[in-house]
Amino acid sequence: MAHEFELRRLTDKLKKLTEEQTRVNNQILKSRRDEQSELDYIRRRFNNQIHSLEERQHRITKETATYERQFTNLEKDIQDERQDSMQAQKDSQQSYNHHRLNR
């Protein structure tokens, strides 16, 4: 009888340990799935953020090139106007001197 009681006690303990081991294994698997899910979410979030920033960088580079080209063209136009103005002033001065000499 004592052996049967001891056998039942050990059997119950083994059963409880087996159930606990099953629960722990399931928790481990769930934790790994949760971890993978969160890693995937974070990876997607950062990939989207990086992609957005790269598109923004591309747009800024394009706009910068456009404005630099406009700036260069404007500087050239200003320089051409100055040269034309100086040439007109020089021509006017030469015409005045020529007219004065011919009198």
Image (tube, rainbow, N blue to C red):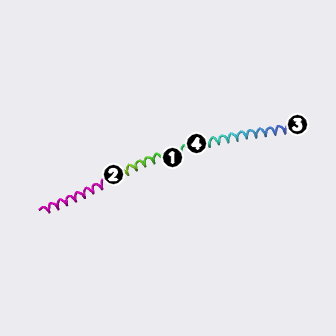
Task: Say the numbered circle drawn on residue 40.
Answer: 4
Q: Amino acid at mark 1?
A: Ile
Considering depth in this image, is 27 or 10 the residue closer to the camera?
27
What residue did someone put label 3 on? 1
Q: Amino acid at mark 3?
A: Met
In whole angstroms, how far apart are the C-alphas of marks 1 and 4? Answer: 15 Å
Task: Say the numbered circle drawn on residue 73.
Answer: 2
> Mark 1 vs mark 4: which is more N-terminal?
4
Residue at the front extreme of this rendering: 102
CB contact under 8 Å: marks 1 and 2 = no
Q: Amino acid at mark 2?
A: Asn
Left or right of residue 29: residue 53: left
Judge depth for marks 2 and 4 and give the one in front.
Answer: 2
CB contact under 8 Å: marks 3 and 2 = no
Residue 68 in the image: x percent, y percent? Answer: 38, 52
The residue lying at 32 percent from left, 54 percent from top is 76
Q: Residues within 10 Å of mark 3 (few under 14, many from 20)?
A: few
Q: Is residue 94 magenta?
A: yes
CB contact under 8 Å: marks 3 and 1 = no
> Mark 1 vs mark 2: which is more N-terminal?
1
Q: Amino acid at mark 4?
A: Asp
Residue 79 placement: quadrant? bottom left
Element marked by disc 4: helix
Residue at the left extreme of this rendering: 103
Element marked by disc 3: loop
The residue lying at 33 percent from left, 51 percent from top is 73
